[in-house]
Amino acid sequence: MTSDKTAILGGVLILAGGLALAVYANTNAEALSQAKAKTVTKYILLSEKEIAKGNHKQAEKFVIKALETDPKNKQAIAAFKKVELAAYTSVVENTKNNSADSKKANESTSRSATPEPVGQPKKPEPEEEAEEEMGCI
């Protein structure tokens, strides 16, 4: 009978140890999950600050780090989309501004001077005749 009691006690100890390990592992998993969430949040905030500054490349780097930390994080995925949209919008606005500026420059240069024909010599401008007294010979 003593061997049965020892076996039962050993089984109970193994079960208790397994439960303790499970609780420890679960606690560790929760701590790891919380740490990941804090890290992702920090990177997202940094990326938003960079977007506000107009530095889209740095914002994208921060969002990529957030996604590397937790690839399935919905906030990180949404932040990535936000950064890409902001970068795209910025490029479109710059393109519109540049084309508008070049149109204005073209209009001002076409109004100010007519271009000289290429390959043709310039016609000399007539000189005004100086009024001289011509004496009779």
Image: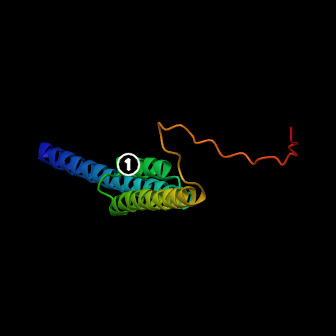
Color encoding of the figure: rainbow
Q: Nearer the viewer, residue 124 or 131?
A: 131
Q: Quadrant of the C terminus?
A: top right
5 relative to 41 in the view: left or right? left
Q: Secondary structure at mark 1?
A: helix
Residue visible at 42% across and 52% down in the picture: 63
Q: Nearer the viewer, residue 7 or 121?
A: 121
89 relative to 125 in the view: left or right? left
Q: Nearer the viewer, residue 63 or 89?
A: 89
Q: Position of residue 62 (x, y in %)?
A: 46, 50
Residue positioned most to the front? 137
Q: How many marks?
A: 1
Residue visible at 41% across and 60% down in the picture: 92
- Residue that badge 1 annotates: 69
Q: Position of residue 48 (x, y in %)?
A: 50, 60
Residue visible at 41% across and 47% down in the picture: 65
Query: Hey, what amino acid is under mark 1?
Result: Thr
Q: Position of residue 124 (x, y in %)?
A: 63, 41
Q: Residues within 10 Å of mark 1 (few under 14, many from 20)?
A: some
Q: Quadrant of residue 105?
A: bottom right
Q: Nearer the viewer, residue 47 or 23?
A: 47
Q: Quadrant of residue 85?
A: bottom left
Q: Position of residue 125 (x, y in %)?
A: 65, 45
128 relative to 8 in the view: left or right? right
17 relative to 116 in the view: left or right? left
